[in-house]
Image (cartoon, rainbow, N blue to C red):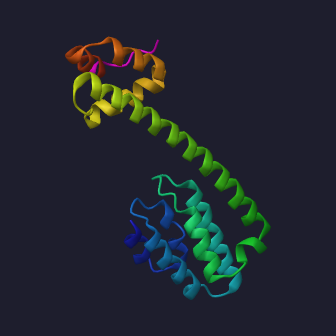
């Protein structure tokens, strides 16, 4: 939690904010301001910002705040990130990984939407959250084509039962 990191009383702990489940752009804006005000030297500030950016690249909760954080730091410390070669390289690498992760999420969302619409046409309602999760897991384990075939071949309750069964990869 962001509040717990602040309560520790040191700007060092603030670099872990991107790892907090409740991290937001607003919280990071405050953290950047606190680091700016609380660091003793420009070098310490640069090191803290570097650590903050590294933590943002980990992004365990899928907050996707790295780009915003880079802008925030650049606004406070004009040109700092671009002047530090290792940070510049890290930013480029993180953006590349983020784009790949975003592409994968986009593909998964497209599969969910397509198969969810097919389910809705066959059953007459949108899938529940559990059914949607089952569709995604089955698409991952068996492939989207196999799931699509089942959605087309199975009727009503048989389809619902199939989604509730354990997954057997083909």
Instruction: Answer with the quarter of the image where residue 24 lies.
Output: bottom left
Residue 112 screen position, x and y as percent: 40, 34
Residue at point 76%, 64% (across, down)? 86
Give residue 88's quadrant in the image.
bottom right
Q: Is residue 78 above or below residue 27?
A: below
User: Is residue 63 within the magenta segment?
Assistant: no
Task: Please name the predominant secondary structure of the magenta segment in the image.
Answer: loop
Quick check: 151 above or below 90? Answer: above
From this view, report whether residue 156 is shown above or below residue 46.
above
The residue nearer to you, when weighing 45 against 145, is: 145
Q: Quadrant of the N terminus?
A: bottom left
Q: What stretch of residues is rendered in magenta?
A: 164-170
The spot of residue 165 in percent (x, y) is 29, 18
Is residue 120 shown left or right of residue 49? left
Expressed as whole percent of the image width and height from the top left, the position of residue 69 reads: 57, 69
The answer to whether residue 56 is left or right of residue 161 is right
Give coordinates of residue 145: x percent, y percent: 47, 19
Comparing 109 with 13, the one in front is: 109
Residue at the image position 41 percent from the left and 23 percent from the top: 138
Q: Residue placed at 67% from the left, 74% from the top?
A: 47
Residue located 47% across and 52% down the image: 62
Is residue 165 toward the left or the right of residue 100 in the image?
Answer: left
């Amino acid at each position: 939690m962001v509040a717990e990191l602040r309560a520790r009383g040191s700007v060092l702990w603030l670099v872990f904010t991107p790892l907090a489940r409740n991290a937001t752009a607003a919280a990071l804006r405050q953290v950047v301001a606190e680091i700016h005000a609380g660091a003793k030297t420009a070098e310490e500030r640069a090191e803290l910002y570097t650590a903050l950016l590294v933590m943002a690249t980990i992004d365990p909760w899928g907050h996707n705040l790295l780009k915003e954080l880079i802008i925030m730091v650049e606004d406070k410390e004009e040109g700092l990130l671009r002047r530090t070669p290792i940070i510049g390289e890290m930013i480029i690498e993180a953006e590349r990984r983020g784009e790949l992760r975003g592409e994968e999420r986009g593909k998964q969302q497209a599969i969910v939407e397509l198969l969810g619409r097919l389910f809705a046409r066959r059953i007459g309602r949108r899938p529940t959250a559990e059914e949607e999760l089952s569709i995604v897991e089955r698409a991952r384990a068996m492939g989207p084509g196999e799931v699509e075939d089942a959605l087309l071949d199975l009727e009503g309750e048989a389809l619902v039962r199939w989604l509730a069964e354990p997954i057997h990869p083909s």
